[in-house]
Amino acid sequence: MVFLRHILPALLLAVAFLVGWEGYVTLSGASPLVLPAPSDVANGLWIERRRIATHAAATIGVATVGFGLSVLFAVVLSVLLHFAGWLRRGLLPLLVASQTVPIVALAPLMVLWFGFGLLPKVLLVILVTFFPMVVSLMAGYATLPRAFRDQLVSMGAGRWQVFRRATLPSARGHFFAGLRISATYAIVATIFAEYAGARRGLGIYILTAKNTFRADLVLSAVVVSALLTLSLLALIQLVDRATGRRFRGARDA
């Protein structure tokens, strides 16, 4: 019941939007080449379901590898930046600058440098998604109350022990917040990389549908990409809830 109460307003708004969209296309007589109705998009998604599923599977594979490596890279980098102040001062501005490069310009460069294989797409996903997690973890490390740290130090804990027992657990909430932000970019970054150069994937499917003036199929792929992103966010939420009780018990202990 609580879940339904949270999701019901969004569902009602989505249904109202789709009904209004369908009504506008029907009454205005808009060309399906320009603005297909939601029913046309759903019909195209059903007819092309096997082909779209094949391309979506390729996108999921790249996004999974890239996002998984991005999480690992973000955690390791945040720890290094936390312990090495000189590295933080020197590297953090460069990391910020890396986020100013438009992904539209970066995707074809990655393909030009590394070819059409898995590597350029994975690198692009990592580059787009790791920064929010690094920033969130750094902010989480800074939330440790000074009294906790002083208490552990007075008990003989070293710097690494303080980090492992207090600093790292205190950053858990920030980590999952950054994880959710990065997850919203993972599928999009993968599609951009495929769009610039790939053999399979939703990016290639969208490009092919655009070149054949099938706006309904383009929107069908967009719907699938949105569902993939929502599924990834739901998975992160489940992991957060599944580990939250154990974390709270360890923290209380």
Image (cartoon, rainbow, N blue to C red):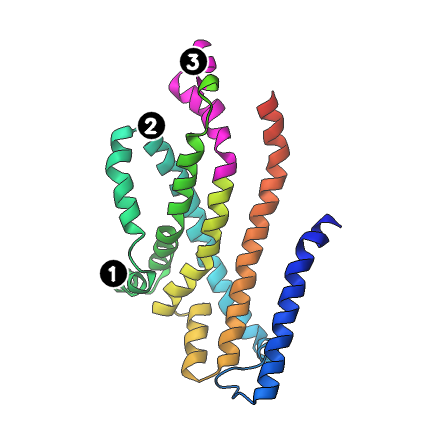
Q: Is residue 38 visible?
A: no
User: Magenta segment range?
Assistant: 149-174
Which image quadrant is residue 12 in? bottom right
Residue 134 as seen in the image, left or right of residue 183: left
Which amino acid, mark 1?
Trp
Quadrant in the picture for the C terminus? top right
Which image quadrant is residue 159 in? top left
> For the stretch drawn in magenta, what is the main secondary structure?
helix
Q: Earlier in the sequence, mark 2 or mark 1?
A: 2
Indicate whether 151 appears above or below 36. Answer: above
Which amino acid, mark 3?
Val
Q: Is residue 101 visible?
A: yes
Residue matched to label 2? 83
Q: Position of residue 107 (x, y in %)?
A: 32, 63
Closest to the observer, 6 or 190:
6
Residue 74 as seen in the image, left or right of residue 48: left
Distance from the alpha carbon under mark 2 to that under mark 1: 33 Å
Q: Position of residue 102 (x, y in %)?
A: 31, 60
Residue matched to label 3? 153
Query: Does residue 167 belong to the magenta stretch?
Result: yes
Query: Does residue 161 belong to the magenta stretch?
Result: yes
**Is label 2 in a helix, a strand or a loop?**
helix
Residue matched to label 1? 113
Which amino acid, mark 2?
Phe
Query: Callout 3: few (<14), some (14-19), or many (20+) C-alpha neighbours within 10 Å?
Result: some
Distance from the alpha carbon under mark 2 to that under mark 3: 16 Å
Which image quadrant is residue 43 in? bottom right
Q: Earlier in the sequence, mark 2 or mark 3?
A: 2
**Number of the front mark, 2 or 1:** 2
Residue located at (47% from left, 13% from top): 151
